[in-house]
Amino acid sequence: MSIQQNQRRIPFVDLAAQYDSIAPEVDEAIARVLRGADFILGADVAAFEREFADYCEIEHAVGVDSGTSALELALRAFNIGPGDEVITQANTFVATVFAIAYTGATPVLVDVDPSTYNMDPELLEKAITPRTKAIMPVHLYGQPADMDPIMEIARRYGLIVIEDACQAHGARYKDRRVGTFGHAAAFSFYPAKNLGAYGDGGMVVTADAQVADAVRLLGNYGQREKYHHLQSGFNRRLDTLQAAVMRIKLRHLDEWNAARRRHAERYSEVLPESVVIPSVPSYAEPVWHLYVIRVPQRDAMRAALAERGIATGIHYPIPIHLQPACRNLGYERGAFPVTEAVAEQILSLPMYPEMSNDAIDYVASAIRDVLEREQPAPGLARTAD
Ligand SMILES: *Cc1c(COP(=O)(O)O)cnc(C)c1O
């Protein structure tokens, strides 16, 4: 039976397909935790911390309940708070900025490089003031930020660097894992991330034993020993159940990231010329959390792809400084022209390890079809309003 074009469905991600590929192992691990009734800071948490630290090629890892908590507790471990400024990029997920604000510090935004969508180191230096305490570069879309100039600036001004690696598990910058450049780094295990839990989870990694210990205390009511509270703290622990699942998934991460890389390379080969494809600097070994293109008349393209059964995303449609929740940061429209311009054109294509080549080709030909039939020639298209 032949399948009609309009019956085809390409999801944006397919977490059920991933579960199918590892179901027996995962079911066994979950059953083991349930039978052991070891739900809070159980043996799997410590084991996963050790295994994730080894994977990241760093000394310490501390499990927490989300990537947002990982960012916030890493900042707090350095006593960053009211009166301090923390510089991050305007193009990121809002959690980067919220985590800074939770500590009482002031988030300061800088624009991104139009070819990598990551922090522009030249703009970073211009944003430094006497109150600046830390820099939070983001390895957005799984693409490593340009860490050498960022670390050089941090050293020169004596600033802490906390990497937001929430989208970049396993990515490398000049052969070194992201998360090992700054004083600490945060990972998220939100289900759709490259390494995702079946719920929320996160991790702080650091080479500094004191920082790891500070995060551990902050995330567990300030106690090292039950009911002995050395300081005030929060409940931000990683569930044993999630840790047990993640130990299984971590063993597959390299193979999944390799599949994402193959898919990205195929997209870049088969997409029409007029589409702006992601550029990969020579320093970068990205892990393709997202495959983000730029097209004129993006919203029309997105709707036309949806009609053809193709789900897409926009990361992110409204820049941080234009969000009502961030009005208090005091930025006007026009403050970050690159972020604002790309927000009108970026489109995230379906990307998950289990995707078939055939699905990628279908997406590419649908985009070609839309560009040729439903839009004016790209050279004539208006790029922004
Ligand atoms: C997902 C994400 C976070 C937050 O992680 P959660 O686990 O959802 O709290 C922070 N920063 C970036 C860039 C992210 O993609």
Image (cartoon, helix red, strand yellow):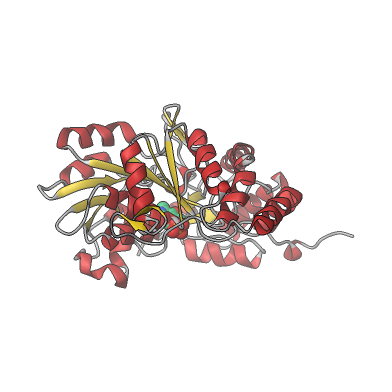
Q: Residue furthest top?
A: 175
Q: Residue furthest left?
A: 130
Kindly identify the residue that appears in the image at 50 percent across and 48 percent down.
Answer: 275
- Quadrant into which the N terminus falls: bottom right
- Residue 83 can be seen, yes or no: yes
Q: Which residue is found at the position 68% from the left and 49% from the top?
A: 355
* Residue appearing at x 56%, y 67% in the figure: 303
State the image coordinates of residue 84 (x, y, percent, origin top left): 17, 54
Toward which corner of the image does residue 330 lie, by quadrant?
bottom left
Report the image quarter containing ligand 1.
Answer: bottom left
Left/right placement of residue 273 relative to residue 379 reads right
Depicted 43 relative to depicted 304: above or below? above
Residue 168 vs residue 56, the one in the foreground: 56
Looking at the rendering, in which quadrant would you find the C terminus? bottom left
Residue extending furthest toward the right: 1
Camera sees residue 294: no
Q: Relative to 130, is 12 above or below?
A: below
State how many labels appear. 0
Nearer to me, 216 or 137? 216
Q: Position of residue 163 (x, y in %)?
A: 35, 44
Residue 289, image x, y percentages: 52, 48
Residue 291 rendering spot, x and y as whole percentages:
52, 48
Residue at 31% across, 52% down: 338
